[in-house]
Structures are given as structure tokens and as C-alpha cells.
Image: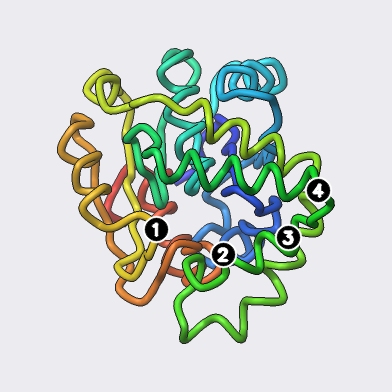
Amino acid sequence: MTPPDEPLVLLPGMGCSSRMWDQVLAAPDLDGSVSEVRRPALRGRSLGECVDALLDQLPQRFALAGLSLGAIVALALTRRAPDRVVRLALLAVNPRPPRPDQLEAWAAQRRALADGASARQLQEQLLPVLVTPRHRAELEPLVLRMADEVGEEDLDDQLAIQQTRIDERPALRRIGVPTLVLAGAQDALVPVARHEEVRASVPGARLAVLPHSGHLSTCEAPAEVAAELRRWLRGSDA
């Protein structure tokens, strides 16, 4: 089977660079499954600005995958421009609006950045909830390197994007493209129940749960993520 004609767009999580997709793209399961890959950064002072910037730079039609904040942006983009997204993959996705404690935490992180904290320092504080204990020693250098690559300005943008999230649940039933929902069974930030909620709301969506992965599944289980993306891209169970 020939790869789909549409490019594959991969959106990162907060504090992560496009490097978070490297091992997924290198996996044998994705070999020949995609003709072109785009990995844009998440920038803008609001969710709407971020979506506008992406729509301006991306092709007319594309397959779209995002993890965590990237998945939230993917939902917002699909809601805004449904005719441009041909298939959708949502990893570590929470479609609900921010809770008060989340808004307070993001505001505190922005204040810390303004006071001179580095993106690396803030990401280091989140390590216990980003990766499972069994993978922390192995993945800590990668996670902190990605934070360095994102930098303080872009991280502040991403926190601003988080603060302007809305409830995406009402729009889920209007999604009309093949949709993969991919959860880490050990995700400390977004439980499997949130993914089940998305799967139940998006017509025809398929849910896959990775048993040994936490929040950053592309780093903890890249081969398994690649296999699920291959099925999604090919539109079959092959």
C-alpha cells in the first residue's frame, strides 16, 4: 500500500521540542507509511493565536497528531478548520477546560519565568508526572534537553496557550475523520478515563492503551506509538 498523499503534522507537548517524535519516526513500523512530515512549534499568546499561526504555515490538507498540549491544539485546529484535517490522532489528551488549580499553577510558572527561572528548571519539577519511574533515569536527559530547546520565550507562550483553553467536549461529536485516541496506562496527568471520554464522543474513534507508558508515550514507548500510528495512517488493522 502506498503512503497517504497528505503530510503528517506532529505537534509536541508543553515544554517539549519536535525531538519528542524522533524515535517514533525512526521506528520500522512507520517506514514507508508517510510521504512528508511537518513538526511545527507551538507559539502564540493564546490558543486562538496558536491555531491561526499553524493554519497559516501548514498545507491545505494534512493528517494531524498531537500529544498533551499538542493534542489540545489539534482539537482546536480541527474545530476551526475541519476541512483541512484528513485524520486525527490524540495522545495524552484532556478535552476538558482548565481547573482552577491548573490555572494557578500555570500563572505561577509564568511568574517564575519572569523572575528568571529557566525552562529546564520548570520541566525538571514536572519530571515525576511526565515519565514513569522505570523510565525516569533513561529519559531525564532527553526531557531536559527538549526544555532547553524550547526555551523560556516559547514556554511562556505555551503556558499562555494553556491558560486560554476552552472545553473542547461539545465539538468532539462533530469530528468526522478517522481518529485514534492513544493513552498511557500509567499517565499521571491524563488518566485513561479522559481518553475513554474522547473515544465515546468522537464518531468511530479507536482507543489504544499502552500498558507500560506514562504521559510522554512517544519517548517511553516509541515503537508501540509508531505501530498505532501506522494502523491509523493506513486506515486498517494491518
Q: Amino acid at mark 4?
A: Asp
Mark in front: 2 vs 3: 2
Mark in front: 4 vs 3: 4
Q: CA distance from mark 4 to mark 1?
A: 26 Å
Q: CA distance from mark 3 to mark 1?
A: 19 Å
36 with respect to 175 (left or right): right
Mark in front: 3 vs 1: 1
| In the rendered image, the vertical position of residue 28 relative to residue 169, given as above or below | below
Q: Quadrant of the C terminus?
A: bottom left
What element does badge 4 sit on? loop
Q: Would you say the residues marked 4 and 3 are in contact, meaning their CB atoms lie under 8 Å apart?
A: no
Asked which quadrant contains residue 161, the reply is: top right
Q: CA distance from mark 4 to mark 3?
A: 21 Å
Q: Earlier in the sequence, mark 2 or mark 3?
A: 2
What element does badge 2 sit on? helix
Which label is found at residue 146?
A: 3
Residue that numbered label 2 is attached to: 126
Residue occupying the point 59% across, 21% down: 51
